[in-house]
Amino acid sequence: MKGTLRSIAGWLVVTLMALLLWTNASYRVSAQSDDSRRNVNQGVSSSYTIAQLNEEAAVLYRRALENNMEEVRASITRISNSLGHISFEGQTSVEGIHALSETVVEVKEAAAKFKGDKHFLQQASAKLRLAVDSLANPAKPLWLQYYKIVKNDLDALSLAANQNQGATTLANRFIVLEEHYETIRPAAIIRLEPYQIVQMDAWLSHLKGLTYAKQSDVSQLRSMTSHGEELVNQLFGREKDESAFVPFVQGPDRRAAGLAISSVIVAVLSYAGYRKYRAQQ
């Protein structure tokens, strides 16, 4: 009887040890599998960059111009999948990331609803192209080249208001201006402060109400277009009286000019002090 109990106890001990060893081995395999998945994800994250995203957005825009819908859908799928593997830390604000995501969704919807409406798809693709380029090239983004276009749109609307043209003409002029602004808006959000976009949106909304009114207030419309010139210059980082073809003077150049002027002033004062000292002697 005692021998039987001992054999049973020994068998239980052996079984328990085997279970412990099997559990430990399974845990190690699971941990290694998790580590490998983590490493793979990190590899994907580090392998896809904003520069590659910019190249893909350029390809998407070209395919949209060609009306190659199969390639457009494939390209937008690649862009959507890559967004989760790119770090935007330090690249833009939360508003910028949100604007980029909304633009991707807009291109998806345009591609899904495409029924011969080339303009809608091409405009959405252009918005995405400019937005991604604004991330990839913060120093000289492509959307800044729209300054002359938006300025011409505003001048055309201002001229129509000054000549007291009809409501239809004013509305058409505003539609062109609004469309061009909406094309660059996500790219501008990525680079500019939120208050600048809020100012432009509020001004454009007020201007829309004036141009679509049955009896437009011409004096107020003229005042709003004049104020819009200042806002457009601020949006594109240009000074009020600056030519459209002259690049904006950046900070380092201004500091250099200030140092040069300060050096001249110090030299003149030093010379005057020296002459006074010699006269006293």
Image (cartoon, helix red, strand yellow):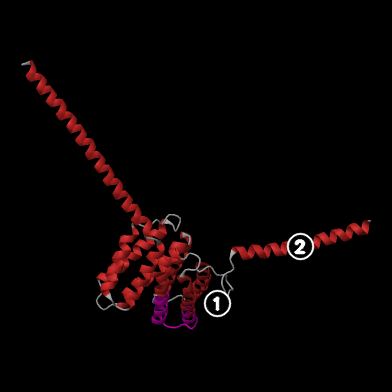
Rendered residue at 35%/65% (across/down): 103
**239 displayed left or right of 208:** right
Badge number at residue 133: none
Is residue 240 in sight in this rendering?
yes
Q: Nearer the viewer, residue 247 or 74?
A: 74
Identity, as a three-letter code, of the amino acid under mark 1: Phe
Asked whether the viewer can see residue 209, the reply is no
* Direction from residue 179 to residue 248 in the image, left or right: right
Marks 1 and 2, the one that precedes in the sequence: 1
Q: Nearer the viewer, residue 238 or 125?
A: 125
Question: Where does label 2 land, which residue?
Answer: 265
Q: Position of residue 182 (x, y in %)?
A: 40, 70
In the displayed structure, 271 sits above or below 182; it is above
Amino acid type for the residue under numbered disc 2: Ile
Q: Secondary structure at mark 1?
A: loop
- Does the magenta segment cover residue 171? yes
Q: Which residues are magenta?
A: 156-177
Q: Which residue is mark 1?
A: 245
In the foreground, 217 or 174: 174
Is residue 20 found inside the magenta-colored segment of the image?
no
Q: Quadrant of the N terminus?
A: top left
Which secondary structure type mostly characterizes the magenta part of the structure? Answer: helix
Q: Nearer the viewer, residue 231 or 106?
A: 106
For the C terminus, give its image quadrant. bottom right
Q: Is residue 1 above or below residue 135?
A: above
Q: Estimate the x, y position of residue 33 in percent, counting from the top left.
A: 26, 46
Query: In which image quadrant can residue 108 be found?
Result: bottom left
Rounded to the nearest whole Å, what is the CA distance between mark 1 and mark 2? 33 Å
